[in-house]
Amino acid sequence: MIVLENVYKQYETSAQRVDALQNISLHVKEGECVILKGASGSGKSTILSLIAGLCKPSSGNVMVDGASISKLIDPFSAHVRREKIGFIFQRFHLISNLSVKENILLPLIPSNPDAKVLDAKVNAVMQRCEIAHKANTLTRYLSGGEQQRVSIARALVNSPKIILADEPTANLDETLSLHFIDMLRSLKNEGVSMLIATHDPLFFQLEFADRIIEVKHGVIVG
Ligand SMILES: Nc1ncnc2c1ncn2[C@@H]1O[C@H](COP(=O)(O)OP(=O)(O)OP(=O)(O)O)[C@@H](O)[C@H]1O
């Protein structure tokens, strides 16, 4: 479902060149749940961004459900992302002057013009993520945990085959984290593949993952 082959990623800034990933190869099968762990700066977010087609590798190949997303130009990689991937970002990336409902609705607009269908999907996912009571609130007025639940709802609204999540429980209390992990478990049982970058001990205590991959200085070490 997700394949990385000999992937390198360098970031060039005016000050320096950063070797963020070096020769990463990994394979996540359909319905498999893999956790990425590693110290801050080890390259976890870069791996997720490459799979989502949000950035390109310096060399190597990234495949998502048979499509070589690393080789597609922007509108086509965005299409693969919209159709197949739900991305839960570390920093939410919500639009602050839109409501909860409008933020969740956004990924659906390009593919689904039927207003009733859209409304039903958004309402269902808001209930699932326990944020329906704030449907009409602008997201700039939400707490960190509430914003996180909106970003989770937005990632799930398209019923993606793949979930990529960057520290998804960082802003949730233990009860909400348990609820979220439970939700991931039911998605996994429905065949959704997931790659989750996390330090949250709950994921490890609950033995949630099929596999844990450790990244160190841009290299897979275990
Ligand atoms: N856009 C960028 N430009 C330059 N360097 C970057 C950029 N994005 C990431 N880096 C660098 O690449 C390396 C890997 O960063 P990345 O964000 O992938 O790590 P991470 O493991 O997700 O860290 P964290 O757990 O703190 O989120 C770091 O040295 C980081 O400073």
Image (spheres, grey):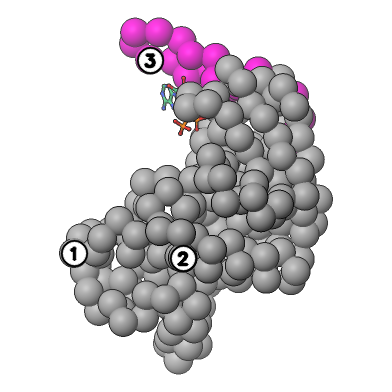
What amino acid type is highlighted by mark number 1? Answer: Tyr
State the residue at coordinates (74%, 71%): 190
Give residue 130's position: percent from left, percent from top: 42, 76
User: Magenta region: which residues?
Assistant: 1-22
Quarter of the view holding residue 72 = top right
Which of pointers 3 and 2 lies earlier in the amino acid sequence? 3
Query: Alpha-carbon distance for marks 1 and 2?
Result: 22 Å
Dominant SS of magenta comes to: strand
Q: Which residue is mark 3?
A: 13
Was residue 179 drawn as part of the magenta stretch in this picture?
no
State the residue at coordinates (72%, 22%): 221
Give residue 218's position: percent from left, percent from top: 60, 21
Quarter of the view holding residue 145 = bottom left
State the residue at coordinates (34%, 11%): 14
Q: Residues within 10 Å of mark 3 (few under 14, many from 20)?
A: few
In the image, residue 94 above or below residue 189: above
What amino acid type is highlighted by mark number 2? Answer: Thr
Label pair 3/2, CB-CB below 8 angstroms: no
* Residue 141, disc: 1
Q: Which residue is mark 2?
A: 175
* Residue 104, disc: none
Does residue 59 appear in this view? Answer: no
Give residue 59's position: percent from left, percent from top: 66, 22
Closest to the observer, 53 or 30: 30
Q: Secondary structure at mark 3?
A: loop
